[in-house]
Image (tube, coloured by chain):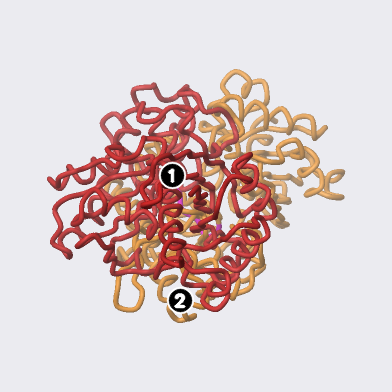
Chain colours: A red, B orange
Amino acid sequence: MKIAGFDIGGANTDLAVVEFDEEGNIFHIKTDFCYMPMWIKKDELSQTLIDLLGSDINKIDAVGVSMTAELADNYQNKREGVLDIAGRVMKSFDCPVAFVGLKGMINYEEVKDNPLDLAAANWIATAPLAAHMSSDCVFIDTGSTTTDIIPIKNGKECARGRSDLERLATGELVYTGTLRTNVATIVDKLPLKDEWVRVASELFAVTADVHMALGNINQEDYTSETPDGSGKSEEDCLLRLSRVVCGDLDLLSHEDVLEMARFIHEKQVVQVAEALKEVTDRENLESVVVTGLGMDIIGSKAAELLGLKVKPMDQILTREDCVVAPAVGTAFLMENFLRKQK
Amino acid sequence: MKIAGFDIGGANTDLAVVEFDEEGNIFHIKTDFCYMPMWIKKDELSQTLIDLLGSDINKIDAVGVSMTAELADNYQNKREGVLDIAGRVMKSFDCPVAFVGLKGMINYEEVKDNPLDLAAANWIATAPLAAHMSSDCVFIDTGSTTTDIIPIKNGKECARGRSDLERLATGELVYTGTLRTNVATIVDKLPLKDEWVRVASELFAVTADVHMALGNINQEDYTSETPDGSGKSEEDCLLRLSRVVCGDLDLLSHEDVLEMARFIHEKQVVQVAEALKEVTDRENLESVVVTGLGMDIIGSKAAELLGLKVKPMDQILTREDCVVAPAVGTAFLMENFLRKQK
């Protein structure tokens, strides 16, 4: 069986086309993604899904969908967002389609009755992959924009929060990511030479600029837009970072800016570690599975800071597949759902 | 003599047309401003200045200009920004024009030699107005985007920092304002019911939404764009604020959101108070003059938190004129400059 799993985020739409043998074991995964800002382009969603699938559209048996895009600020509320997105998905495909909800996969009719069951539930899809690696652990999925920190016990996720709002309170969601996070939301002051300098509260630079400057990611990883609309070279990233203290590359040396970037990175890791400690302490868990684009530079570092054991998910998936782990997990859940219906 | 003072900011361009008697005393002030985001519309700057002046263009004797717009991220560096803006100003007027620099007014030829003298110097223009009220004080000008905290001794400004970068280190500039500041740069967590909730690092809501929700400003004061492009009613502002914790107005009551707004306001005041304390302690100053759109809700509150004496600048200017105090001060400095040349 061949199944397409989509993870429709506010900024990125991810796809995994997964082939299963008759026992439901994965034997092939192909992944892709594109930058599709839902707050600008929601009318293009259907075409984007079809384009991402390409020629596979005639070869797949079913489609599974998880989403977080309903949070985008072009929707009045999550209910409206979920119904709009699910409706667009349904119009795009002829094969069976189901959605990842907080209680498992549900079909479109059920979505219409309880749209909030679907809101921001993509972390549900990643849980079985992490549970496969360790039946008692916390998994940390650091994407472009957010970090999920989900406890797993006896092979099942047991997050205390269900909605994003609840998870922001329980430490299970930290709204910080590898690419899109405004650095002014991470730091109030930066060390520069022998002083502390307050930061400008504009959107002058993002974490992608920090991680590019530090060599933590490549230019191909920088898939989001740049804050100033200019390039993604190391020099471009350094210039954007210099603006965070109202500087430029006349006033600040590369080493000055790198000092700032190292501090921002450190602060971001600490932010994730604080939430991780809330979760591991509460749940008495000691091992961590990391995935997502920021698995090495954020998730692992936060776990190491707390002295926790770390398993990277690239032990069972390729690194490319880890970046879209919720899409892979969504296809996995969809296969299960279909098999149970038989 | 009738003089136009312009303060060209990154987001707002302010104008004061000031009439002086023969001794150089102000006897009439007319002010205006418009929202002109320089990172999008710099090609319209010249026309904007001319439109703002209206029929006064044929009645004025001279033009004075201060600027902070060179920081906008469409410029590679401040040098390029200052030269571009000054060049556009020169093409707009036939009468004498001079610019507020860190060492006083300078003409265009001098600007071309030392463009950095002009960068972000608009606070220089406000200093004489504050000094007129108190010869030993700190003045706090809280605009739409930033807050200047400038010490005055013996009637003269004596800021330790000159550039924005330096002033961000000395406590003389806090990059927080009444309208445009992303609330996610002010708070990391918010109190909600009986819990602390982390915030989303997107640009979901700004300080204008906070101050509208709390009744601190009117809809006419909300001159900047809204983060989601929708309206400026109280309900619109509450919806944007609810998104800061990934909520909406289905999930959160108005009172929940107001609790959050009060906390953000408090935190903003504390941020300004911390910097103010650095400046007053260092300079041994005890009295404060406040001006700008946020004079009552941010500047005064910060001073009161520290037990300092507060004089609002609306004792000598109207409240409307206080909002564009650097433009009034720029006209004042220009009149002085011309009189000295005679």
Q: Is residue A307 left or right of residue A130?
A: left
Q: Is residue B192 left or right of residue B251?
A: left
Q: Is residue B244 visible?
A: yes
Residue B8 image offset from top left, x and y in percent: 65, 42
Q: Is residue A107 left or right of residue B74?
A: left
Say whether mark 1 and mark 2 are on the same chain. Answer: no
**Along the line of sight, the residue nearer the viewer: B106 or A27:** A27
- Is A167 magenta? The answer is no
Disc 1 residue crowd, few under 14, some 14–19, many 20+, Cα 10 Å: many
- Is B178 magenta? The answer is yes
Q: Tag 1, which chain?
A: A
Residue B297 image offset from top left, x and y in percent: 47, 67
Residue occupying the point 48% across, 49% down:
A1
Q: Which mark is residue B124?
A: none
Q: Is residue B79 left or right of residue B279?
A: right
Residue B213 vertical placement versus B97 (above, below)? below
Residue occupying the point 35% across, 62% down:
B198
Q: Tag 2, which chain?
A: B
- Residue under circle 2? B258
SS of the residue under disc 2: helix
- Residue under circle 1? A324
Question: Start and end of the magenta stretch?
Answer: B173-179
Q: CA distance from mark 2 to mark 1?
A: 37 Å
Residue occupying the point 54% across, 55% down:
A63
Quarter of image, res B304: bottom left
